Structures are given as structure tokens and as C-alpha cells.
């Protein structure tokens, strides 16, 4: 692992090299991978189009770097340790050799079912090793996977299938989540009623739910692999061929399909994994995310497995069968690096230190955080109670679009500061811009977080709509990638992420576009109009606050609110259900008819002492009414 930074001066040196000569810097790192053909140029880029290519004309298959590469030295080493939802069920340990065989076999099975290079495959599965196998089998044959979090509704699933015109869906009969059993295949069936591109569905048996298998379309996983060879010759891919699409919410419209490609994503996820977590051979690494999110892609599956690490995969939830579950798993598997989200930390913090008492947690060396700003209180609790004061916290800032961690301490190397993501990784050239697009130089500044030079795992496009990619990320500030986050660089040059500056709400680390939630609410037949904003929530970070104008006739307020929540649940999924709903008679609007969210945000937050100038509103009186009504909102 020659690419590993070990000292602060080493970090500074690497960082400077990465800025002065990016070609040389990334070329050297990419050299440690297996390529069928080396690249002609390291990077070609133009942020205005945008058009970014890394390792131009390089040929590779990411799974050869993850499987074949490790067979010789690590063949018998655990690649995946799987901890089931029910602690009484048996753990599964899959070695690199076994993973190789499972991936090759399933790759062959998918091919036999008609999947070809370039086809899109939707993965809608629980957290079981087969989900990782499914992703890797796609990569093996050059199919493009798009994992959809298995908590999303049939409608959300159908939208994604439709958008990418998927040929196949991989799913399970059901999911275990805590004490719940969820009938997953049913959701797929419902989604497929309204889409036409899917030819085959492969179904893994997990819960024993009764399912209807549609003749000629559905096939059991076990039947699909029956008698199929465990050898497969990897498809040779161009560095810029699509590896996967992952849908994520933005401030406008429907979720968009963020596209990542093979070469750059491989290099960056490996490099960032090795450095941020300082993984050492023999360590057990655990990231608690779901593979439905980018964190699961980059830091449960690709990054750790490319680095030859042992990655733990957990099927369940932090509070089942009790709030000590995370800590029980850490001790049981002697976890060395533990990576979770602030919302999980805050949810567990509520139970106090008691649930931690039975556990030593002495194997932990590094603890990480991702998904949203971590408040100081949660940071200290995590540091003191989980890390026992001896584990560095890596607060990692990044996005679906960045593919890998951008700003984070390097464990044990970068001095940490509560609530600070600290410093950019080598290769990441940050810029803070004011609203007029001027770069704010020097320390003690605050503004919009932008990036001025490409890194290997930057998104390449949004699937089927390149203009949307340009508009969303590359048009706010000419020549820069705009993250949508606000940031402060303090007097020491350290970065603290301040949260979204656009209309995206971060609920328990999940991105929700306000427009998306509004559209779902508006589907309720009695709703006339709605406006959604975020407000501070003790556990979720942000909660969803919906102001709704509706026709109340024949309904109680309580019933109507429940129905609205159910509508959102059906259209998007449970994570988008509004925490608070306020029925209002009007929404504050400008004379041009634009909703004044600034005012609604203030009311939702309870900051009503200074509402700013409301005189230019079309309907200033409604503000008073909303403030009064807000006092009784649930
Ligand atoms: C937020 C998750 C503060 C941020 C990897 C970003 C964070 C959005 C952090 C991306 C962090 C993520 N500190 N905020 N350490 N990590 N965010 O695409 O607002 O699900 O833009 O990627 O989460 O969310 P996404």
C-alpha cells in the first residue's frame, strides 16, 4: 500500500504534488492497478460543457482489480463478513476466492438471461452478500447497475426503471428490517405494471414470503445459477464506460441518475478508502450504510474490496433487538474501522451510555461519520463513548456526485476538530465563492463550496439528460463544480460544512428535494398547494415541514394529515413523510408568484422575531396567520 499517507507533512507534500502536477500524481496511483491497456492521457476536462475524462483510452475491468488481483495473496481471506438482521442467525463469511466464484457464476447467469454489455440492471435488494455480488457481476459483464434503496415505493422504483430503461431487475422475496418483514417482490411487481422495458426478474429467496412468479419473466436466483460455471472472462471496458447510475434528489424535478465510470471511480475509491481509514491488512472494516446509497457503493463494496480489505455487511437496524446492537457487532467481529452517520449516533445517544456498557469496543481504531454535518454534542458523544477518547473521528464530506470522500481527516494523521471535516484529500481543489462568483481567498471566510479541478470520480453526466447535469452543477459559477453546500474555512484553514444552500433537505442523511416532496403531497386530491422546508430535528438532523393549503370539507385535520403522509409514503417512500404538517389558508408569495421559502423556513425553525421585510409580498397578512398556526403544529 505504497499510496498511503502516514504523516501530516506527508499529507501536505502529497497534496501539493497533486495540485502542481495532477497527471503525474494520479498516473502514479493508477499504475498500481491492472489495466489491459494503459491510458493515453491522464485527464481531459472542460467544466463548461461539462466534459471530463480520466485515463483516456485506458482499458480495464474493475472486478479484475477486485477479484483476480487478490486471489494470489488473499484468496482465503474474508472479503465479506455478513451479519444478519437476527443475531441468532448464522454469520456468513465469504473469502476472496468464494466471492470470485459467486461473481463469475452470477455474471454468467445474467448473460444467460440475456443481459449484455451496456444494458441497465436495477438492484432492489436487502443487505445480503448477494446484493454486492449482483453489483460486481454487472461490472464484470459491462452491464450498468442502478441500485435502488429497497425502502423506496413502487412508484419511485418504476420512475427509475423507466428513466434508465432497465432490462433486468434483481430483487428478493422479502427483507428483514428489525422486527419487520417487508414484502419486496410485491413492490417490484407493482412497479413493473407501469413500465415496459424489463424482460427478466431474478428473485433471491430470503424471508420465505409467498410470491407470485410471472411465467417467462421471473426466475429464482438459485435456479438461475444452477449448474452455471464459476469461471468468467471479464469484459474489457473503456475507462470512461459507464459503471453505474445512482439516482439522487436535487432541488428541482425528479431524482436524477448520477453516472460514474469505470477507471476514475476505481482509482479514487481505492485511494480515498486506504487513506481516510488507514486500513491495515487483517483489519475488519464496517460501514453501516445501505448499498442503496453512494456510501454503500464506494465504502462497503468497491473501495474496501478493491483495497483487499475485509468489509462487514449488516442486514439490520441499529436498535434491533436492542440499542446495543452496533456495539455488540463491533465486539463480535472485532471491528477496527467503524463508519456511520450522525443520525444513527444521535438516535443511539438518546439511550445514554447504558447500552454500551456490556461491550469493550477495544478493537476500534478509527470511527467515521458521513451524510450530514455532525453537531458538536454528537461528535463528543461518539468520541468519548464509542471511540473511548482514543479513536480519531473521520468526518467525511462528500456526495453521490463526487463518488468518493472529498474533505476529511486522514485517520491519525490530520488533527481533528469537532464538527469539522478538516482538510481536502489530495487532488481535491476547493474554492469558496460568494454569491457573485468571486473566490474568497485566505482564511476566516464563508460561502458556497465549489471545486475547481476535476478528481477521478467526479460524476460524468446525469443519465439521459446532460444539460441537466450542466445546469445543476456547472452553471451557477462558471468554470467551477458547485456542490450545493455552504462552507466555512476557519482561521486555521479548516473546513466546516454548513449544510445545503439550495432546496435540498437532508433527513437522516438522506437527500430529499423540497419540490419532490411537494409534488407528492399535491397528489392528494384535497390538496390545493403546498410548500416544504427543512427545520432542525434532534435526531434526523433536519425534519420535513409541510405547509399545505387544502379543501377540508368532510375531513378532520388529523385524518387529512394522515392521508397526506400516506400519499407521500406511497409515492416516494417512508423517508419522505413530513414530520410536521401545517394546514394554511395561503402561502407567502412575491408579486411574481414565487413562494417565499425564507419566511417559511424561519417559521418552521421558530425564529419568528425578525421576519425581515414582508411588505413586498402579495399577501403579507398570511404571515401572521401562519406564525400563529405554527404554535399548534404536529
Ligand atoms: C451532506 C452522501 C456535512 C452534504 C455521501 C452533501 C455532509 C450531501 C457530510 C450529499 C459531512 C455529506 N458533513 N455534510 N461529513 N457528508 N453531507 O449525495 O450536504 O447522499 O451535499 O452523499 O450530504 O449527500 P449524498
Image: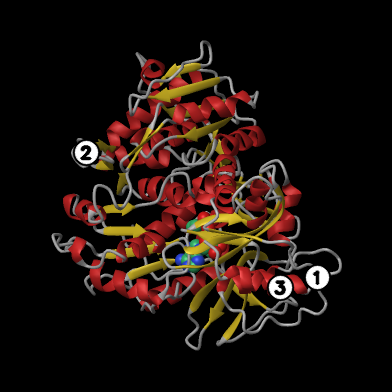
Q: Circle 2 sits in a helix, a strand or a loop, which is it?
A: loop
Question: Disc 3 marks which residue?
Answer: 623
In depth, the one of 537 and 363 nearer the eye is 537
Q: Dot 3, how many residues are within 10 Å of its Cα: few (below 14), some (14-19), or many (20+)?
A: many
Mark 2 vs 3, N-terminal side? 2
In depth, the one of 538 and 194 nearer the eye is 538
- Whether tag 3 and tag 1 are in contact, CB under 8 A, the answer is no
- Kindly report which numbered mark, 2 or 3, lies closer to the viewer in this rendering: 3
Question: Disc 1 marks which residue?
Answer: 619
Residue, far top: 215
Q: Circle 3 sits in a helix, a strand or a loop, which is it?
A: helix
CA gap between label 3 and label 1 equals 8 Å
Q: In the rendered view, does 351 fall on the left or right side of 471?
A: left
Instruction: Find out if the beta carbon at label 3 lies less than 8 Å from the nearest ligand 1 atom.
Output: no
Looking at the rendering, in which quadrant would you find the N terminus?
bottom left
Q: Position of residue 83 (x, y in %)?
A: 26, 42
Mark 2 vs 1, N-terminal side? 2
Question: Disc 2 marks which residue?
Answer: 91
Please tell me whether residue 319 is drawn above or below residue 484 in the rendered image.
above
- Residue at 31 percent across and 65 percent down: it is 350
Q: Circle 1 sits in a helix, a strand or a loop, which is it?
A: loop
Q: In the rendered view, does 623 fall on the left or right side of 225?
A: right
Q: Position of residue 468 (x, y in %)?
A: 73, 51
Inspect this view and state whether residue 2 appears: no
CA gap between label 2 and label 1 equals 61 Å
Q: Position of residue 12 (x, y in %)?
A: 44, 76
CA gap between label 2 and label 3 equals 56 Å
- Residue at 21 percent across and 36 percent down: it is 89
Q: Can you tell which quarter of the image residue 499 is in?
A: bottom right
Amino acid at each position: 500500500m505504497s499510496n498511503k499517507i502516514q504523516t501530516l507533512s506527508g499529507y501536505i507534500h502529497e497534496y501539493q504534488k497533486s495540485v502542481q502536477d495532477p497527471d503525474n500524481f494520479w498516473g502514479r496511483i493508477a499504475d498500481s492497478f491492472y489495466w489491459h491497456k494503459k491510458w493515453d492521457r491522464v485527464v481531459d476536462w472542460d467544466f463548461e460543457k461539462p466534459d471530463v475524462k480520466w485515463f483516456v483510452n485506458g482499458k480495464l475491468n474493475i472486478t479484475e482489480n477486485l477479484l483476480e488481483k487478490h486471489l494470489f495473496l488473499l484468496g482465503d481471506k474474508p472479503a465479506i463478513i455478513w451479519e444478519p438482521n437476527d443475531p441468532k442467525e448464522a454469520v456468513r463469511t465469504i473469502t476472496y476466492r468464494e466471492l470470485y466464484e459467486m461473481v463469475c457464476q452470477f455474471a454468467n447467469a445474467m448473460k444467460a438471461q440475456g443481459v449484455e454489455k451496456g444494458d441497465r440492471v436495477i438492484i432492489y435488494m436487502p443487505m445480503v452478500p448477494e446484493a454486492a455480488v449482483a453489483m460486481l457481476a454487472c461490472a464484470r459483464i459491462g452491464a450498468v447497475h442502478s441500485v435502488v434503496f429497497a425502502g423506496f415505493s413502487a412508484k419511485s422504483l418504476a420512475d427509475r426503471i423507466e428513466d434508465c430503461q432497465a432490462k433486468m431487475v434483481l430483487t428478493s422475496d422479502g427483507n428483514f428490517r428489525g422486527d419487520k418483514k417487508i414484502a419486496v417482490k410485491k413492490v417490484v411487481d407493482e412497479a413493473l405494471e407501469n413500465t415496459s422495458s424489463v424482460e427478466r426478474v431474478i428473485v433471491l429467496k430470503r424471508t420465505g414470503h409467498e410470491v407470485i412468479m410471472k411465467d417467462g419473466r421471473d426466475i429464482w436466483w438459485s435456479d438461475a445459477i444452477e449448474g452455471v460455471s464459476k469461471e468468467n472472462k471479464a469484459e474489457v471496458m473503456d475507462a470512461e464506460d459507464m459503471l453505474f447510475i445512482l439516482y439522487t434528489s436535487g432541488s428541482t424535478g425528479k431524482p436524477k441518475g448520477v453516472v460514474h465510470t469505470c477507471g476514475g471511480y476505481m482509482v479514487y475509491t481505492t485511494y480515498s478508502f486506504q487513506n481516510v481509514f488507514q486500513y491495515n491488512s487483517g483489519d475488519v472494516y464496517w460501514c453501516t450504510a445501505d448499498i442503496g446509497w453512494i456510501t454503500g457503493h464506494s465504502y462497503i463494496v468497491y473501495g474496501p474490496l478493491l483495497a483487499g480489505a475485509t468489509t462487514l455487511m449488516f442486514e439490520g437496524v441499529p436498535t434491533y433487538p436492542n440499542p446495543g446492537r452496533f456495539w455488540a457487532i463491533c465486539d463480535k467481529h472485532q471491528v477496527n474501522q467503524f463508519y456511520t452517520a450522525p443520525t444513527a449516533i444521535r438516535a443511539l445517544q438518546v439511550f445514554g451510555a447504558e447500552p454500551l456498557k456490556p461491550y469493550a469496543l477495544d478493537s476500534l481504531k478509527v470511527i467515521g461519520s458521513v451524510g450530514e454535518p455532525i453537531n458538536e454534542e454528537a461528535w463528543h458523544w461518539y468520541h468519548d463513548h464509542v471511540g473511548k477518547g482514543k479513536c480519531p473521528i473521520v468526518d467525511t464530506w462528500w456526495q453521490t456526485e463526487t463518488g468518493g470522500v472529498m474533505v476529511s481527516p486522514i485517520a491519525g494523521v490530520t488533527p481533528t476538530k469537532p464538527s469539522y471535516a478538516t482538510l481536502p484529500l489530495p487532488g481535491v481543489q476547493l474554492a469558496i465563492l460568494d454569491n457573485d462568483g468571486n473566490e474568497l481567498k485566505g482564511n476566516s471566510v464563508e460561502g458556497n463550496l465549489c471545486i475547481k479541478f476535476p478528481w477521478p470520480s467526479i460524476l460524468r453526466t446525469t443519465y439521459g439528460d446532460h444539460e441537466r447535469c450542466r445546469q445543476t452543477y456547472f452553471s451557477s459559477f462558471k468554470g467551477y463544480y458547485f456542490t450545493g453546500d455552504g462552507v466555512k474555512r476557519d482561521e486555521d484553514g479548516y473546513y466546516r460544512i454548513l449544510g445545503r444552500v439550495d432546496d435540498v433537505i437532508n433527513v437522516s442523511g438522506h437527500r430529499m428535494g423540497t419540490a419532490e416532496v411537494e409534488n407528492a403531497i399535491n397528489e392528494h386530491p384535497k390538496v390545493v398547494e403546498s410548500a416544504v422546508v427543512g427545520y432542525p430535528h434532534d435526531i434526523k438532523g433536519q425534519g420535513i415541514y409541510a405547509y399545505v393549503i387544502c379543501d377540508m370539507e368532510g375531513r378532520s385535520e388529523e385524518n387529512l394529515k394522515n392521508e397526506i403522509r400516506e400519499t407521500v409514503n406511497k409515492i416516494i417512500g417512508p423517508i419522505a413523510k413530513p414530520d410536521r404538517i401545517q394546514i394554511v389558508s395561503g402561502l407567502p408569495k412575491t408579486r411574481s408568484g414565487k413562494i417565499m421559502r425564507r419566511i417559511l423556513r424561519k417559521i418552521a425553525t421558530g425564529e419568528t422575531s425578525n421576519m425581515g421585510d414582508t411588505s413586498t409580498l402579495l399577501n403579507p397578512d398570511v404571515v401572521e396567520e401562519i406564525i400563529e398556526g405554527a404554535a399548534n403544529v404536529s
